[in-house]
Amino acid sequence: MTAFLRRWFAVPLWQRVVGGMLLGLLVGLASPEASAAIAVIGELFVRLIRMLVVPIVFISIASGVTALADPHKLGAVGARTIGLFAATTACAVSIGMAVGLLIEPGAGAALGSATPHALGEAKSLHDQLVGIVPVNIVQALVDGDMLAIIFFSMLFGFGVILAGEAGKPTAALLQSVGQVLFHLVRIVMEFTPFGVLALIAKAVADNGVAVFTNVGWLAVAVATGVVLQILLVHVPLIALVARRSVARFYRTILDALVVAFSTASSAATLPVALRIAHEELRIAPGVASTVLPIGASIGKDGTAMYVGLLSIFALQALGITPDAPMLAILLLTGALAAFGTAPIPSASLFMLAAALGAVGVSPEQTALVVGFILPFDRLLDMTRTVASASANLTVTSVVGRKEGNVTQEALA
C-alpha cells in the first residue's frame, strides 16, 4: 500500500486530474448508474472548495496589502509600479469580459445539476454601493458577501500597516495563516482526481460528450484574451512609454515567457525575469529588484483576464444575462480579486467566487462552475501565465524608463 501511495504521489497532480477526467468520461458513457452512485464524491469535493473560499479571499487580500508595507515598495518606484499594475489589471478584466461576451463560451454549457436561474430583483446602485461597507463583518463572512469581505480585507490590511510596530505581529499572523491555508488548498487539491472523476461522469451521463464543446470554446477565449491583452495594453506601453522596439523586447524576454508557460507560475518565472531585466533589458538592478517581486505578487494580468472571462462564462452557463451594473461590479471585484490571488495552483478559480458572489450567484452554483472547469485548468493556467509574465517585464521597463535607469543601448 505504501509503495502504491508513493507511486501515486510521484505522478504530477495535473496528470492525475487528466486521468480522472478520462475515467469519468468512460464511466459516464458506459455506466450512467455508476455515475449516479459516485456523484456524492463530486458533491463532497465541491463542498471542500466552498469551505475554503471565504478564508482564502479574506487572508489573501489582507496579507497582500500588508506585504506592501516595505519602505522600499512604498516609495516613488513602488507607487508608480502599483499604479501601473492596477491599470493593466483593470484592462485585463475588461478584455476578459469583452471576449466572453463576444465568443459566448458558456452558452449552453452543461454544469451537471446547475440549472439556469434568475437572480431575483436587482439591487439599486445606492444599495450596491452602501452594501460594500458591512454593518457586521462576521455576518458578511457567514453570508459570503464578497464585496463587503474584500472591502474589509483591504481596510484591515491598511490598518495593520498604519499600526507600524504594533501591527507587525498581526502582519506576521496573516502571512502565517495564509501559508496554512495554502497547505489546506494543496490537501484539497489532492482529492481533485476523484472529485473530477465523479463530476465529469455525472455531467457526461446527463449530457453526453457535448459537455466538452464549451471547454474548447473557453480555451479559444483564453488564448484570444491573452493575445489581446498583450497587443492592446502591453505593446503600446512598450512602444510609447518605455520607448523600446517591440520586436526586440519580445525576442529578449522569450525565455521568461517560455518558463511562465511551462511552469504556470509567476513566482517560478521571477529568477529568469530578473536576469533578463538586468542583463538584456539593461534596467538598473534597484528598479528591477523592486518592481519584479511586486509583480510576482500582484501583477496578475493573466489571472485578471481569466477571472473576467470566467465570470461571463459562468453567468452564460447559468442562463443569466448581465446588465450594466452587474458588469461594473464584476470589473471591480475581478480586479481586486486578481490582486489578492494566492501563488498556488488554480487559485484564480477560488477567487472567481469573489466576483460571482458579488453579483448574487450562490456558492453552490459557483462551486459547480469550478468543478466543471478544474479538469482543464492546468492548460488554461499555463496560457494565461504568459500574459502575467509579459505584464511584469513591461511594467518594469516602463518604470525603469521613467526613473531614468535604462541605458540608451537597451532602447535601440
Image (tube, helix red, strand yellow):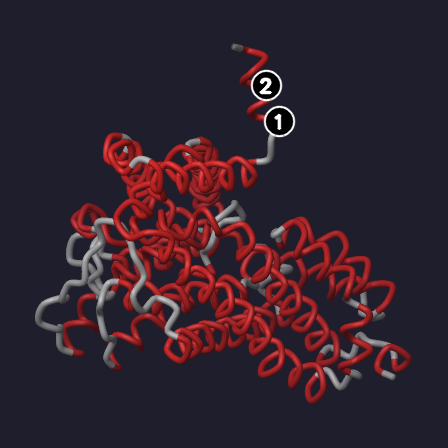
Residue at position x 56%, y 54% in the image: 379
Quarter of the figure with residue 80: bottom right
- Residue most toward the left? 121
Residue at position x 29%, y 36% in the image: 35
Left or right: where does residue 348 sit relative to residue 147? right
Say which quadrant the C terminus sits in.
bottom right
Pointer 2 residue? 6
Pointer 1 residue? 10
Which residue is nearer to you in this view: 21 or 238?
21
- The reply to whether the C-beta atoms of the residues labelled 1 and 2 are less than 8 Å apart is yes
Q: Is residue 356 above or below residue 122?
A: above
Task: Identify which amino acid the numbered label 2 is placed on.
Answer: Arg
Which residue is nearer to you in this view: 8 or 157?
8
Q: Residues within 10 Å of mark 1 (few under 14, many from 20)?
A: few
Q: Is residue 172 above or below residue 75?
A: above
Which residue is nearer to you in this view: 131 or 387?
387
Task: Identify which amino acid the numbered label 1 is placed on.
Answer: Ala
Secondary structure of the residue carrying numbered label 2: helix
**x and y, in percent, of residue 279 in the image:** 87, 63
How many numbered circles does the render carry? Answer: 2
